[in-house]
Amino acid sequence: MDNKYVRNMYQKGPIVFISDDEDDQLIFKPILEELAPMSDIIFFNDGHEAIEYLKITPERPFLIISEVSMQVVNGLELRRQIEADSKLRRRAIPFIFFTHPVYRHLVEEAYELTIQGFFEKKQSVEEMRTQLDAIVRYWSDCLHPNRFAEHE
């Protein structure tokens, strides 16, 4: 097998987490550090901060996790801005919504923007940890364009 395409247990690149809820940041940082020890965890309070980072960073994120409802630039608007920029559109894979509450129209609108997942945050920290574990494991093994880009 060509070593160029051997998959690592954990993907390189930061996990970009976008939420204006400081409690989310306090809860998810240690969980994500445990689940993806090779990835830096970078938090942004709104979509505007995140889009500015994504435009200038040379790193390709391992995973982008965003809340939908935020002040300034919400998650859907962030995703629209990413979709409108051909360079960012390819680099911003995978893009996952991890949010509460969830409404059908939000899920439908999000998938129109070619996201790679939409999860409703569970109520307990342990349930959220289980969700994040499944997300990290899946994307650690899933092939997508950024996987190949790191070998170019």
Image: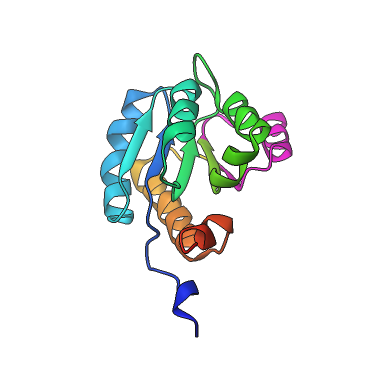
107 w.r.t. 81: above or below: below
Whether residue 66 is in magenta: the answer is: no
Tell me if I can see residue 121 in this picture: no
132 displayed left or right of 117:
left
Q: Which x, y percent locates residue 89?
A: 61, 41
Q: Residue at x 44, y 46 (%)?
A: 61
Q: Which x, y percent locates residue 79?
A: 60, 32
What residue occupies the far front of the structure in this picture?
152
Q: In terms of depth relative to the viewer, which is nearer, 100 or 3?
A: 3
Tell me if I can see residue 20 in this picture: yes
Q: Residue at x 45, y 71 (%)?
A: 7
Q: Which x, y percent locates residue 60?
A: 45, 47
- The image quarter containing residue 83 is top right
Q: In terms of depth relative to the viewer, which is nearer, 10 or 32?
A: 10
67 w.r.t. 130: above or below: above
Q: How many dots with numbers?
A: 0
Q: Which x, y percent locates residue 8?
A: 39, 68
Q: Residue at x 51, y 33 (%)?
A: 99
Q: Which residues are magenta?
A: 99-118
Whether residue 111 is in magenta: the answer is: yes
